[in-house]
Image (spheres, rainbow, N blue to C red):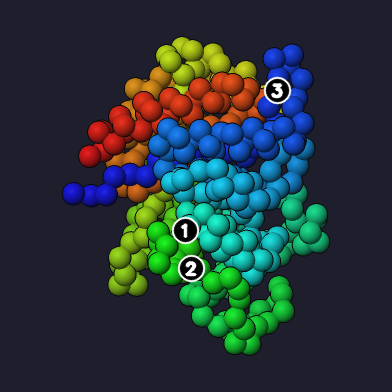
Amino acid sequence: MANPIELGLDTFGDITAGPDGRPHSHAQVIRDVIEEGMLADQVGVDAFGVGEHHRADFAVSTPDVVLAVIAGRTKRIWLGSAVTVLSSDDPIRVFQRFSTLNAASNGRAEVTLGRGSFIESFPLFGYELSDYEKLFDEKLDLFAALLKNEPVTWHGTTRPSLDNQRVFPPIEQGTLRNGSLRTWIGVGGSPESVVRAARYDLPLMLAIIGGDPKRFLPYVDLYQHAYAQLGKPVQPIGVHSHGYVAATDATAREELWPDYKRMRDRIGAERGWSPMTRAEFDHEADHGSLYVGSPETVARRIAATAKALGLSRFDMKYSAGTLSHEKIMRCIALYGEKVMPLVRAMTA
């Protein structure tokens, strides 16, 4: 029998609003994210991911610090980033932070590495956008070498070279993943990124934020074909998409719609997108990559995506703009207690 699909939750620490409509402080949102991670553990969610951003509408710039606090207050849930922007960070420091998180959590850490769909970190840390591709290529090459838990010799142009250098702390042997730090490669739609993940023998996390998820089948096929050429077994494939769970389909849509629209229109204005209409929202909820509705509806749509793409993991990004912490907590409880058992039954 195939292993059951892993089901996780992701957040970017979106700045939420209180009952009076006023935005919470970044500090309060971080405290709320910690509480959300604790609840996810309590209701049986498999994994909890926190994204990295460097802008006013998201509270978390250092996911590993937030995850470390959650690690100390939870028992079993996997803790990872969603994503870590490796291009504007130092691979050694990223490895050290997540190796430390892995030790503190008794082997429950994982990391998703990406180039980032937001670019604020590049000028913040002094990197040129013209080096977007080279930065990720070189830094991923170094990070992959670090994952071997051996002294590293590496040469590149984006940071000083290493000559038989050991990096501490190493990934601990004998923990849940026995000396390995599961490292996903986040991909938003680049064939080159898919092939790169296979070349480094790393799991693939597809960020599907709109449209029919089956349109990503060519990327799944490409990933599997790359492994066939390498003569290796295929690593897990996961999907990260937006969603929200409430008692009924109508309640879920009405609660999510205004906050989701504000978030989408704010980001869309920066990228030249037209404002979202209610018809577009409903179409995404019915046929696209927005998993919103009752537990039964959300479970049915997750299971359909998992079967179509052959997934080992599905992560639902549950936070959406100013959507309140109270609604988020109800969503997390329903996801763990209702959605997950239904998805497991449907994909068994």
Image spot of residue 246 (x, y percent) = 46, 19
In the figure, residue 146 lies in which quadrant?
bottom right
* Picture residue at 42% right of the left edge, 14% below the top: 248
Of marks 3 and 2, which one's residue comes earlier in the chain?
Answer: 3
Residues marked 3 and 2 touching at CB (< 8 Å): no
Front-most of residues 219 and 102? 102
Q: Nearer the viewer, residue 176 or 325?
A: 176
The reply to whether callout 2 and callout 1 are in contact (CB within 8 Å) is yes
Q: Position of residue 325 (x, y in %)?
A: 61, 25
Left or right of residue 323: residue 298:
left
> Residue 50, image x and y in percent?
59, 44
User: Under tag 1, what secondary structure?
Assistant: loop
Which residue matches tag 2? 172
Q: Residues within 10 Å of mark 3 (few under 14, many from 20)?
A: some
Residue 27 vs 329, above or below: the answer is: below
- Pick the front one: 245 or 238: 245
- Which quadrant is home to the C terminus? top left
Q: Is residue 213 left or right of residue 171?
A: left
Q: Amino acid at mark 1?
A: Gly
- The numbered disc on residue 107 is 1
Q: Which mark is residue 17?
A: 3
Q: In the figure, residue 94 lies in which quadrant?
A: bottom right
Marks 3 and 2, how far apart in space? 41 Å
Judged from the image, the secondary structure of the residue bearing numbered disc 2 is loop
Q: In the rendered structure, which amino acid carries the disc numbered 3?
A: Ala
How many neighbours does mark 1 have within 10 angstroms: few (below 14), some (14-19), or many (20 or more)? many
Q: Residue at x 45, y 35 (%)?
A: 42
Q: Which of the pair 266/275 is nearer the observer?
A: 266
